[in-house]
Image (cartoon, rainbow, N blue to C red):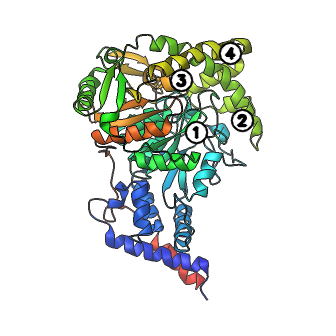
Amino acid sequence: MIGLSEMKLVAGMAALFFFALVSGESGDERLEYTGLEAQEHVNNRDFTCAEYVKVLLEQANENDDLNNYIGLDYTDAFFRALDTDVLIKEGGAGELSCIPFVVDDNIHTSLFPCTAGTPAFADNVPDFVGSVLTALEASGGFLLGTTNMHELAFGVTNFNANTGACRNPFDKDMFSGGASGGSAVTVAARMAPIALGTDTGGSTRISAALNGLFGFRPTVGRYGQDGVVPISSYRDTIGLIGRSVEDMQLFDKVITGDDFVPENLTLGQIRLGYDYAEFFDDSVIDSDYHLALRRALNILEDSDVELVPLGLDSLFEKQEKCATNLVFYEFPLNMTTYLESTPNGYTSDDLVDHIATDEVARIVGGLFSGDIERLTESEYNSLLGNDCAAFKSYWRDLISDLDGIIFPTTILPARPINSTSENEFVRFNGEWVPAFPTYIRNTDIAGTGQHPGISIPATFNPDGLSLGLEIDGAIGSDRHLLEVARLVGELFGGSKRPSDITYYSLSSASASIVALPALMVGLLVAL
């Protein structure tokens, strides 16, 4: 008698045989499906979940030089997909059934260690999974793996001396952005339709912008932060990176239980504030970026969207008063609490002594040793109650009669990977400038204000590198902002297709990562 395990092997063989019939010379069309599109095909029995997951795994195998994964078990993922097919057949599928996703490697999972890209956490096997991942998996969400990131999420380039740099799929000589670069590259390179990133000052949005994707940072507190390696309790949040806003709306609904969608919202009803001098003038953005952004702004001006000129000359001054000092105060406290909660009981010395990336070691080590000056508790509380509260009030007044404020996500595109300087400095308008404050110039507004923001794939610079436009909304306006982004995103043609990767098809594959001969041998033994 054939049992369940043998049935899985038979199903696996059938999946591989079917795949051989449908794969084309120009790449398997399933690579381009959004999560919802793939799910619809699976539910319609056009192909199985195992067949779909196998295509994504083969795509990862073909493009492993992007260095986007930290945790991935090809065989386990394939057999879990077979389990999903059994559930679907038995009517037990959830709302996210067979929508594969990946997560930054600083988010707890039940499948892999949570390393946060740093050597000290190589054996950090979590003893719990946080509320966000629990909600997704309870609804049938399919976790593929964990992704490369800037070490401890302390950076924007995704250069990591421990795991190696993650490469941009539009040009592999360029960095991916960070700290959620691995997640963004996985989605952009068609290895998964959606990802969970983390965002303190811009990670999900910077990474999305540099990889032709949508990147969503929710209102702080909307998504639970349990089961995440922390930086700042004031700023930190899990975010979403995807090729489709509809996928992101679904994931947001499952995470929060909030299913609100503005009825009959049209482009003609959307009012977006902007300040050309502060955000679009060639004096504040990279020179080879300016014309492309000007064209993107023209697309908005020619649409039915109402663009409302604003005077935001005091915005950055107000925002900067509640920025770095707050993070530097919170990090050692938040990290110490996390270290003590781990099964291994790590200490700060364990962490600092093993940090591989020099700039991260300098900052983290300095914060724990006191070499970097921090606020006192009294000063911190005063900062929260005065400057931070004042900025949030200022933003609330700014946006009171608007759907959002729009600006370039970053003021320059991706730059070349440079392992000698760890991309601490980048070229901006002919000068070397610090990478971190340059890339978070605009995204840090939402981190400081605790409000939602979403980066929209907008255009390319002359070198074919992806550029994004960000829309920030009011605190709590997340569902409305997602719908605004969906409509505005359609104006720019949605997510962008990378040019510097291989698109998997059966004829292009160097070797299948779920080997048919192995399955056949296993079946013969089982029988």
Provide residue 448's location: percent of width, then percent of height.
54, 22
Provide residue 277's location: percent of width, then percent of height.
32, 14
Looking at marks 1 and 4 on the same chain, the residue that comes earlier in the sequence is marked by: 1
Looking at marks 4 and 3 on the same chain, the residue that comes earlier in the sequence is marked by: 4
Residue 117 is tagged as: 1
In front: label 3 or label 2:
3
Residue drawn at x 45%, y 23% is 399
Residue drawn at x 31%, y 18% is 276
Q: Secondary structure at mark 2?
A: helix
Instruction: Name the quadrant of the N terminus.
Output: bottom right
Residue 449 is tagged as: 3
Q: Quadrant of residue 84?
A: bottom right
Does the rendering let one see residue 121?
A: yes
Label 1 to label 4: alpha-carbon separation = 29 Å
Instruction: Name the quadrant of the C terminus.
Output: bottom right
Report the residue marked by disc 2: 338
**CB within 8 Å, label 3 to label 2:** no
Report the residue marked by disc 4: 380
Label 2 to label 1: alpha-carbon separation = 16 Å
Q: Secondary structure at mark 3?
A: helix
Front one among 59 and 455: 455
**192 horizontally vs 144: left or right:** left
The amino acid at mark 3 is Gly
